[in-house]
């Protein structure tokens, strides 16, 4: 029988966080969810927390403004997973995690910490463009704090959340696929990797009790989901039984339009640039000191791009 752990999820009401709570419960871990007092009368969040409790999770009160409250909740568990926000068009709070790192350091009992990463590996983005590089820089600041404190970790590089990238046929600013037209970013041939957010959560929870993932980066690369924008569009066209009207946006045009947007939009567009024009997710081999999730956990039946896209029919 697989080992069970006591797991604290911070940011459990978030887009990814709620899936981590679900996956942790599904894999039989004793699951604690941080209930931050600051959420006040946010009825949706409170109702979500209550539904976690009904499903067997423990709600624990704590605040990023109260160090001792964080230490107290961290002491209850063996594993901490943080899914605090890190998308500028929603909210970006990555550096707040430094407070959580301090609490984990003081508590001294945590056997594994998964910080809020779940995207492009920030260690590979030293030359990323402004202003989007802030995401990678901040995640690296958190990594350094974790490693300096000697906290055991796993970093999850989850590649593209399917909801954003497949939903919009890899076009920034769209999260529902058109049945009429699509604009390729450049030639549309750079490969990227798309992962169902529920699968990201399942794989992430699998790593927490796995000695093979200790102090390593785990990339999630489901082999059938390594596709170019053109290939994603072909899958969609097959599903709807119709060809889309196609155009493309050159790199220069994309960068010029980007400069006219507000800061939060520019951050997101920078990320699309690195993924879709440079192919930053799939243009390297996974080296020593890192692992790939679908190889580690072949028992997980991941959602293919085609299966994922049927939800939009
Ligand atoms: P959300 O924007 O959904 O936020 C998650 C949680 O952050 C919230 O539920 C909240 O937790 C917490 N939070 C927000 N503001 C504060 C604050 N001021 N103080 C404390 N906590 C706060 O996050 P996502 O799920 O979108 O992002 C999670 C991670 O996934 C990030 O690292 C992000 O970069 C990454 N990501 C990757 C993508 C990809 O394509 N690879 C796409 C999107 C995100 P609560 O209120 O519950 O305490």
Image (tube, helix red, strand yellow):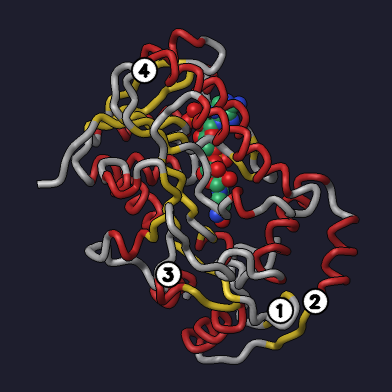
* Alpha-carbon span between mark 2 and mark 1: 6 Å
- Work out how far the residue at label 4 is from the one at label 2, CA to CA, in angstroms: 51 Å
Question: Is any atom of residue 182 visible in this view?
Answer: yes
Of residues 215 and 39, the one drawn nearer to the viewer in this rendering: 215
Q: Quadrant of residue 95?
A: top right
Which one is earlier in the sequence, the residue at label 2 or at label 1? Answer: 1
Q: Secondary structure at mark 1?
A: strand
Residue on which the image places disc 2: 249
Residue 265: mark: none
Looking at the image, in which quadrant does ligand 1 appear?
top right
Q: Nearer the viewer, mark 3 or mark 2?
A: 2
Circle 4/circle 3 CB separation < 8 Å: no
In the current view of this chain or complex, which residue is farthest to the front?
288
Of the image marks 3 and 2, the number of the one nearer the N terminus:
2
Contact between labelled residues 1 and 2, with CB atoms less than 8 Å apart? yes
Residue under label 3, please give it: 308
Mark 4 lies on residue: 108
Residue 312: x and y in percent read 49, 71
The image position of residue 218, as x and y in percent, is: 42, 53
Label located before the other in sequence (4 or 2): 4
């Amino acid at each position: 029988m697989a080992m069970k752990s006591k797991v604290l999820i911070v940011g459990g009401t978030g887009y990814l966080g709620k899936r981590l709570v679900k996956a942790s419960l599904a894999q039989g871990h004793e699951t604690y969810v941080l209930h931050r007092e600051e959420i006040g009368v946010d009825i949706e969040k409170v109702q979500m927390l209550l539904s976690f409790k009904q499903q067997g999770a423990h709600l624990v009160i704590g605040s990023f403004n109260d160090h001792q409250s964080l230490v107290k909740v961290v002491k209850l568990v063996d594993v901490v997973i943080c899914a605090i926000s890190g998308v500028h068009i929603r909210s970006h709070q990555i550096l707040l995690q430094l407070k959580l790192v301090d609490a984990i350091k003081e508590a001294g009992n945590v056997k594994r910490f998964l910080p809020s990463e779940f995207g492009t590996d920030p260690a590979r983005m030293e030359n990323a463009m402004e202003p989007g590089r802030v995401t990678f820089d901040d995640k690296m600041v958190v990594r350094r704090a974790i490693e300096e404190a000697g906290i055991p970790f796993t970093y999850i590089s989850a590649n593209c959340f399917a909801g954003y990238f497949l939903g919009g046929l890899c076009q920034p600013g769209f999260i529902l696929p058109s049945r009429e037209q699509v604009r390729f970013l450049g030639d549309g041939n750079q490969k990227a990797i798309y992962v169902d957010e529920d699968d990201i959560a399942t794989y992430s929870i699998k790593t927490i009790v796995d000695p093979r993932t200790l102090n390593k980066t785990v990339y999630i690369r489901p082999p059938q989901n390594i596709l170019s924008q053109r290939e994603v569009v072909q899958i969609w066209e097959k599903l709807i039984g119709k060809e889309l009207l196609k155009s493309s946006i050159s790199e220069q045009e994309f960068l010029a339009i980007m400069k006219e947007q507000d800061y939060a939009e520019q951050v997101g567009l920078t990320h699309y640039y690195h993924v879709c024009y440079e192919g930053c997710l799939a243009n390297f081999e996974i080296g020593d000191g890192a692992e790939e999730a679908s190889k580690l956990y072949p028992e997980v039946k991941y959602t293919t791009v085609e299966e994922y896209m049927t939800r939009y029919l």
